[in-house]
Image (cartoon, rainbow, N blue to C red):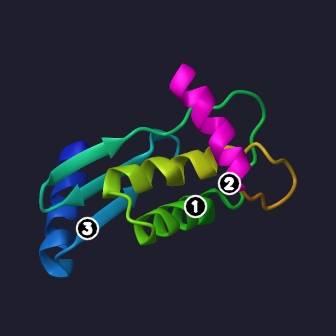
């Protein structure tokens, strides 16, 4: 991963949109660039077989819903990553992540 290049792109995009720039990095998580600076929000580790269909949509759904509910950019990126970590474990279907599944995953992440 070329971090200096990603940061440069993020800062240039931020200068045009004046709010926030987020770059999905797959299993590596999300790079969030705001006027306050850049934050790397790591992906949520999972084990076992995965199916990545719908992972990006889950990230965006969790992220946007969290921002609309008042989360910070980093908090929203973390919730988006958690949603994707649930979705990719639902094999052979475009998965979803319910509120209860997110709560359970948070308990695992917090204990881990």
Using a 10 Å C-alpha cutoff, classify the residue at mark 2 as few (fewer than 14 neighbours), some (14 to 19) or many (20 or more).
few
- The residue that disc 3 covers is 20
* Circle nearer the viewer, 1 or 2: 2
User: In the figure, is residue 108 to the left or right of 68?
Assistant: right
Q: Residue at x 15, y 58 (%)?
A: 8
The segment highlighted magenta reads 98-112
Say whether disc 1 or disc 2 marks the residue closer to the N-terminus.
1
Dominant secondary-structure state across the stretch colored magenta = helix
Eyeballing the image, is 14 above or below 91? below
Q: Residue at x 28, y 66 (%)?
A: 21
Regarding mark 1 in the picture, which secondary structure is present there? helix
Direction from residue 33 to residue 47 in the image, left or right:
right
Q: CA distance from mark 1 to mark 2?
A: 18 Å
Distance Cα–Cα, label 3 vs label 1: 18 Å
Q: Position of residue 75 (x, y in %)?
A: 39, 50
Q: Which residue is mark 2?
A: 99
Helix, strand or loop at disc 2? helix
- Percent across and percent down for residue 74 are 34, 50
């Amino acid at each position: 991963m070329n971090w200096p290049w990603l940061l440069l792109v993020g800062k240039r995009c931020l200068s045009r949109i004046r709010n926030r720039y987020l770059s999905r990095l797959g299993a590596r998580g999300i790079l969030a660039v705001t006027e306050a600076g850049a934050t790397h929000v790591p992906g949520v580790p999972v084990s076992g077989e995965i199916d990545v269909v719908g992972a990006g949509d889950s990230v965006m759904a969790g992220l946007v819903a969290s921002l609309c509910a008042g989360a910070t950019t980093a908090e929203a990126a973390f919730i988006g990553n958690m949603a994707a970590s649930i979705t990719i474990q639902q094999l052979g279907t475009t998965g979803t992540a319910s509120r209860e599944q997110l709560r359970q995953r948070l308990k695992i992440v917090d204990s881990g």
